[in-house]
Image (tube, grey):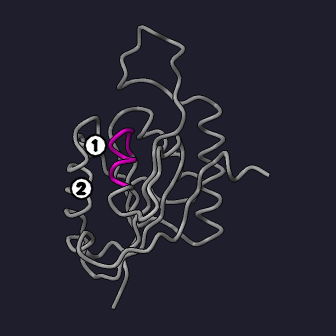
Amino acid sequence: MSKKRLLIMRHAKSSWENPGLDDFNRPLLQKGISRTSLVSKALMENDFIPDQIISSPAVRALSTANLVIENLNLSAEIVIQEQNLYFRGEEDYFNAVFACSDEINTLMIVGHNPMITAFCNYFLTEKIDNLPTSGIIGLEFETENWEDVTSTTCYNFARYFPKKMKS
C-alpha cells in the first residue's frame, strides 16, 4: 500500500509595523523569512518535498509558500491558493486535503492559527498548544486516497519548530 504525507505549516512571522494595513495584506518579517529558510532546509535534508502546496491567499501565508518552493527549487505551479483557508473553520482544511488529487503523494498546507493548530491536533496523539510561525508538523498515512486520511493509521514523522532547531 502506498502512503500519503501531509506537511502542515503555519505561515511565517509577519509584521504588525503598519497598523493601517489590513490583516490580509500583512507582509513577512525578516525573522519569518529566515525561519522559513531553516525549516525548508530541514525538509530538503530529510527528503520531505511537497508535490503540491495549498495555501491561504493572505500575503503572509502565500509568501511563506513561495519561500518554501524557492528554497526547495520547486515550480511555482505547485502552489494553489484556497480562499477558505483564510480564517474560516478547521473543516475547510480537511476539505482542502480531501479534494487533493490522489496522484499527489506529499501535500503541504499553509495556513493560520488557531485553525491550523486545531487541524494538527486532530491527528496528533500528543497535542500541541500552538503550531509556531514557520512550524511544520509532518504526518504520514497508510492510504492511497486523501479522502481516507481521517479513517486510517496516522504517523507523526516530523516536527520542525524553528526555535527548537537553532543550534
Q: Is residue 114 magenta?
A: yes
Q: Quadrant of residue 4?
A: bottom left
Q: Which residue is mark 2?
A: 96
Crowding at label 2, few (<14), some or many (≥20) Cα neighbours within 10 Å?
some
Left or right placement of residue 135 versus residue 122 in this view? right
Q: Is residue 65 visible?
A: no
* Residue 8 place in picture, x, y as percent: 42, 56
Magenta stretch: dominant SS?
Answer: helix
Secondary structure of the residue carrying numbered label 2: helix
What's the residue type where badge 1 is placed?
A: Leu
Q: CA distance from mark 1 to mark 2?
A: 8 Å
Secondary structure of the residue carrying numbered label 1: helix
The N terminus, quarter of image: bottom left
User: What residue is rendered at 38% in x and 55% in y?
Assistant: 120
Query: Do residues under tags 1 and 2 come within 8 Å of each other at their CB atoms?
Result: yes
Q: Nearer the viewer, residue 127 or 5?
A: 127
* Residue 135 place in picture, x, y as percent: 53, 49
Residue extent of the magenta highlight: 111-120
* Residue 130 place in picture, x, y as percent: 47, 43
Q: Nearer the viewer, residue 78 or 151?
A: 151
| In the depicted structure, whether residue 21 falls above or below residue 61 | above
Q: Residue furthest front?
A: 126
Q: Which mark is residue 2?
A: none
Q: Which mark is residue 85?
A: 1
Choose the circle earlier in sequence order: 1 or 2: 1
